[in-house]
Image (tube, coloured by chain):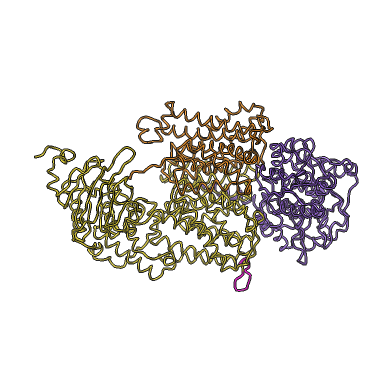
Amino acid sequence: MQILTQLIFSGIALGMIYAVIAFGYQLTFATSDTLNFGQGDALMLGALVGLTLVGLGINYWLMIPLVCLFGAFQGAVVERIGVRPAIKIKSEFGWIMSTIALGIIFKNVAENVWGRDDLKFPSPLPESPLKFLGANVLPMEILVVVGAVLMMLAVEVFNRKSIYGKAVVATFNDRDAAKLMGINTGLVITFSYALSSMSAAFAGVLIAPLTLTGATMGAVLGLKAFAVAIIGGLTSGMGIIVGGIILGIAETTTGFYLSTGYKDVPGLVLLLIVLAVRPQGLFGKSAIKKV
Amino acid sequence: MKRSHLLVAIVGVALLMLFPVGITNPYYIHLLETIMIYAIVLFGLDIVVGYTGQVSLGHAGLFGVGAYTAGVLVMKLAAPLWITLPAAILVTAGFGALLALPALRVSGPYLAMVTLAFGTIIQILINEMSFLTEGPMGIKLVKPSMFGHVLDEREYYWLCAVLMVLALIVVHRILRSHLGRAFEALRGSPVASDCMGVSVYRYKVYAFVISAGFAGLAGSLYAYSEQYISPNSYNFELTVLFLLAVIMGGRKSRIGSMLGAAIIVLLPKLLDDVEMFRYVSVGLAILVALTAVIGIQRGRLTAKQMAIPVVGSIALAGLSFWLKTMTDWRLSIFGVIMLFVVYYLQDGIVGFVRNALNIKRPTPDAQIAGAGLKGGDAVSTAADAGTGSEILNASGVLMQFGGLKALNNVDLSIKRGTIHGLIGPNGSGKSTMMNVLTGIYQPTAGAVSFVGRSVVGRTSSDIALSGIARTFQNVQLFGEMTALQNVQVGLHHTFASNLFDVSLHTPRYLREAKGATDRAMGLLQFVGLAGFAFEEARNLPYGKQRLLEIARALALDPQLLLLDEPAAGLTAPDIKELITFIRKIRDHGITVILIEHHMDVVMSMCDTVSVLDFGQKIAEGVPAAVQADEKVIEAYLGGTAA
Amino acid sequence: MIRFTKIATAVALASMSSFTSMAMAADPIKIGVDGPFTGGSSSMGVSMRDGVRLAIEEINKSGGVLGRQLQAVERDDEAKNERGVQIAQELVNKEKVVAVVGYINTGVALASQRFFQEAKIPVMNNVATGSIITKQFDKEPENYVFRNAAHDSIQAPMIVEEAITRRGFKKVAILADSTNYGQLGREDLEKALKAKGVTPVAVEKFNIKDVDMTAQLLKAKEAGAEAVLTYGIGPELAQIANGMTKLGWKVPLIGSWTLSMANYIDNAGPGGEGARMPQTFVQEPTNPKRQSFIISYLKTFNPKNARMDSPVSAAQGYDSVYLLAAAIKQANSTEGPKIKAALEDLKTPVEGVVTTYNKPFTKTDHEAITANIPVFGEVKGGKVVYAYPDDQKKASVVQMKK
């Protein structure tokens, strides 16, 4: 029983990480119908840049806003180079290929700058576990959950309350009408990409102390976060949190009761099942297209 | 095939076969072998990416399934070649179906991610199921034996070459057949495709499964070629390379696939060898600069266009001299090449060369036997013509979008052999009604039955095949296909041939193909477009496009034809012609529902007219009665009653 | 237009001349060097490569072999078996090497060696320890695979001896990775344990690049393990140590020599201290040869904190080149069969860093290291030291093959 609680707690922490990254997918999809296939690499860059800053002596907590700034910048670059030209030439999969290409480039550059080994990220919180309901929970894991929820709340509030948030929602609903209303839709899309990468970079520095930091850390995370986005529903914030928790717990329990090699499988299989049975996700709304 | 093309092809194949006789170093033979194996994968991938326009990130996984099917059969059962190759094809096609059936219900980025997930799952399964696959330790193979003799490097090369040429021929035949047209159609206009009886979902799945089969064949050949397989190889990097190869070589082109395969095999080798790379990059920079200068001088290119390629290639050359080893940056170079291809080389190298040298795409079926059938014969005669019985009945149809009731409790009864008009102001629900009748929308409530069978809940393609055809308010032609091909898509239902018939060009297929071509020409003649048969549909003048849509719809041998504003945008003489056509269609016993705003057309042709306003039927009857109806005048016709 | 033709011709001529000048250097003896220079195994690969480079430089400076210079043809196999296969084919058919040193990873060696065996090119395994590596071609009349590393049939019994006999643990768990190295090593451990009448209480597997070892460690803990025996490489071993810290369960780690890798020590932090492993070479100047090796290595490659990333790989890499050079000289030829014959009957002893090789190989015995040569190392203060002071005292006396 104790083991089960342990697995559940680890699963929730893991799931929240996926949720934060998945959130980033939702942001760009909402405004531009595109996804950043290099989302995982944005996370990886955030973690590595954070590692370098911490190595230079900057305090972990001070480092976070710096990494967020970096993430925003990186997202804007991706949008400028990868997505905007593709939307302009109305290429149907041009942006898929170009975000993949940019992700590959980022990963390779990271490999050459930081080396191909995985590095240890110094933890800002004590590394000894706390006892909670009989299971071991690392302080860092609690920080991850708190940080993830805070970030998503912040973005939700922003969307609903501020005028910029309304501009984002307007662009989501009807890009051309928004443009006609004087909203600079190009800027809105750039902004959503910046926000998306920023959330990924933030997720990166949150999880880096829990796992090893290296150039390859982003790939599988990006894919699983996508699974969470689909399972929860690409249009629902609540769905992403629920989807994340489901996936995280499924992973840790599979890893223990079945075999660790298979732990990535349930998430991916769940993705395929949800797409087959309910493509809009558990919480998403389906839209009817007018012909 | 044109004479000159055939000659070039024969020379190419001969050179391919003679290669290992001239160059005996096993290293180079193996290299070319790998290129050919990858080319087979790309032939299949091109069907999915180039023709149906879907992005698949899972083909490395399918490739791996093929390799491991062969490997496991050899390791566990010492299976011979003539079992492992077909087994690999079938097993991989099976996996392809398993993936495609759920995945292709969605499109675009969803499919890309799903295939990516699939590829990852495959890698994990191969890695973990070590009782079957030996996991990370991999499987060792030796070259296969044929007729008791173990093939050496050269003989195996010939085997691969033969199989590649066969694969090429089969793919070529598939894409030239009605299957290929279906693939292109579903990309050109998914809605029109469904309504012409070509189910978008089903054919996307076919395309994917066929490509999986090719990937499986290539995978099994790869296993024997490398003599060692391990789960690591079938990863994301390989799948990206496959995509890059298809796009860079050129979509919808066999030569493009072969060129792409050569590039992705040779490029890493080139990057491994720094010296060689330096020469090549310098050469490339010079070439690009020269092209830019000549192009600008001749006015065909602008400085702004060429700025990035020129600067980029010079930077690449400079970089190669500064870096000690290029292999570390291999992936970045691939990424940059990908970006370059996406923005500058959208048609790939083959497309670029074609444009530059102004070579046109080879047009199929350039020779048509006979001038088709007599115009009248091309249009089928509908059954039970003139009996006046009810052919379509819609009762209490409610179509609600959120809070908006686009159709509010509408009843409609269409009599056979009549021309039934449907008029009303914009937004009254006419097109919505059409979409409900053709299965594009599921009505929120109500019943619709056609010839006694309910329409509600059936797919558009199913409804189309049961006898309802339509045209669209916004023309939905398959723009990149010729007029003839567009009509041939409508004739898809006349083909009973399957994949084998198409690959082997059996008499049944040849018969059906000729029949379809003749019939299509006949239909074009009927609408007066015979002269435009080989013109791309998007190049036709607007009025002719509308007529082409009608010809295509007639190809379905419908009993009911729905025309959505066929006269919109036509000039007066064109409208007169249109009226003649519609009358002729009615004379063949085909019932017509006509949505129109041109009142003269409606009044002169229709037997009955129904009027919609705000989703409700406000009047129905013979044209004269409707014209005089007060409610109709107020809502739509304007003015006061006389 | 004419201007461009001129410039183009000039460039073409320039490139052609530099091309020809390249081809005119004296004909060197090509030695293939195959190892993982990137990835999780890279600290071993890079150290091995550097040891090889050092040896080649020294030999070339004193005139080369048979009057010709040695040239290393280095290829990065990324610890991937299929890369090794492709590299082997390239080295045989394109580069036409005379002999090969290398292979860090057992799996890569097992997958690739047969191409050299077929081409009759000798392979000197200088790091990979899988027991069957030198036995792969036992059934054939001539075996071209040699080794100067301490193979797992030596290491596994040593590990078991240390855990069961010397330190008295009754319940042990085995954690091994899923590669050929890990799984073959696990088999060797289980065999050695059985010889002492012990069955492991838990046998767990993990993949390369795995980060979370909680599941495996929990199972070992539940089974009551008093020590964990490992067969893996640096990054994952570090995660085992970290996982133990996270679970608050600290039992001794005793495993194969890879617990000495720099990326294990660095990533495991304080939780990695105290791990013990067999070592053929510890980075301490315990005799003049070793001292000069360490000094020139540090001077040439200047590693961080003056610590070799993998001292064993560096030393064995260095020795492997000297062994080959001696054989080539004795055979007075670069033909594979002749080099092999010379290796199997080396007439003059070769003074290496690990040991002095006196007739290390015979026709049937291709292993240069025997059980008396390796000692136990321990991770202490961020580097590897002698676990037992006795060993350190005896270290100045070179142990030769028994």
Residue C160 is left or right of residue B575, and the answer is right
Camera sees residue B490: yes
- Measured as percent of width and height from the top left, residue B115 is found at 51, 50
User: In the current view of this chain or complex, which residue is farthest to the left?
Assistant: B642
The image quarter in which residue A126 lies? top right
Q: Which chain is purple?
A: C
The tint chain B carries is: yellow
Could you tell whether C215 is left or right of A33 in the image?
Answer: right
Q: Is residue C348 magenta?
A: no
- Name the one closer to the observer, B164 or A169: A169
Residue A99 in percent (x, y) is at 51, 42
Q: Residue at x 53, y 37 (%)?
A: A19
Q: How many callouts does the rendering have? A: 0
Residues C161 and C375: in front is C161
Q: Is residue B538 visible?
A: no
**Front-lying residue, C401 or B73:** B73
Residue B352, how many percent across, how many down?
45, 51
Which x, y percent locates residue B527? 24, 57
Q: Is residue B517 left or right of residue B87?
A: left
- Point out the image quarter for the C terminus of chain C: bottom right
As for residue B153 lying within the magenta part, the answer is yes
Q: Is residue B527 above or below residue B322?
A: below
Colour representing chain A: orange
Most extreme residue toward the front is A1
Tell me where the magenta segment starts and ends, as one range.
B145-154
